[in-house]
Amino acid sequence: MDQLDYAEARKIYERAGITGRVGFGSRPAVLVIDLIVGFTDPRSPLGADFSQEVEATRQILVRAREKQVPAFFTTIYYRKDMQDAGVWPLKFPTLSVLQEDSEYARVDPRLGPAPGEIVFLKKYPSAFFGTPLTSMLLSKQVDTLIVTGVTTSGCVRASAVDSLQNGLRTIIPREAVGDRARAPHEANLFDLDAKYADVVPVSEVLSYLTRLP
């Protein structure tokens, strides 16, 4: 989508009244989606250079930990026979490299997790589908979910939509999410910002976290 397409889409959305903002609440949590070695190491069949996204996420985590804001991480891996992956491998055969005993399933060591932070396993794009994330957030009375990770067009998008559907103010720091290709990344950020979440600069998220008591 080129700049003219974005401008036209913005006009269409504005005419439809799709212009709102959710803003920040008072009880945030950070969700780090699939920033695991299998995605952040370019040598992996699934990997790409997500150094910028890892660094932006690291900055958010540092500030969140200072404020005792809870952080959750996801990983993704499967049985060797892929029976727990359903039909997804028909679209995405290289998922088979993500095995429980593989280095690829580990959270990128630049990010942690810190002691007490939870890493949970998901099998599908959304961090909410078939996982305990909803109950974890409810137990901590979270009202704002800061979503980072990869990929923007896949697991980040699915998780952000489910976050909204679970009644959470959903914040996506632009520099802290990434994709393998720019076109789906930008198109999905545009649409997420219009309909489901607030896409904001990392600096805005850091300022928000700093202001927390």
Image (cartoon, grey):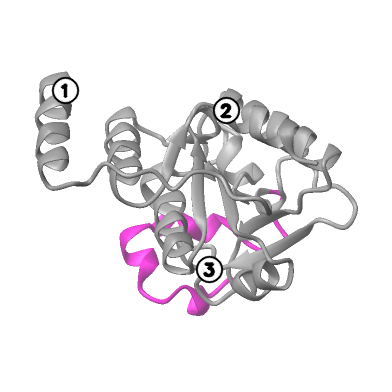
Mark 3 in CB contact with mark 2 (< 8 angstroms): no
Q: Quadrant of residue 79?
A: bottom right
| Marks 1/3: CA–CA distance | 32 Å
Find residue 5 and report its horizontal and vertical position in percent.
11, 28
Q: Nearer the viewer, residue 178 or 62?
A: 62
Mark positioned earlier in the residue sequence (3 or 2): 3
Which residue is the site of mark 3?
A: 128
- Which residue appears at 50% of the width and 32% of the height? 48
What is the secondary structure assignment of the residue under circle 3?
loop
- 149 horizontally vs 158: left or right: right
Find residue 138 and report its horizontal and vertical position in percent.
66, 72
What is the secondary structure assignment of the residue under circle 2?
helix
Foreground disc of the pair 3, 2: 2
Q: Nearer the viewer, residue 167 or 185?
A: 167
Mark positioned earlier in the residue sequence (1 or 3): 1
Mark positioned earlier in the residue sequence (1 or 2): 1
Q: Nearer the viewer, residue 18 or 112?
A: 18
How many marks are shown on the rendered structure?
Answer: 3
Query: Which amino acid, mark 2?
Result: Glu
The residue segment tinted magenta is 79-103
Which residue is the site of mark 2?
A: 204
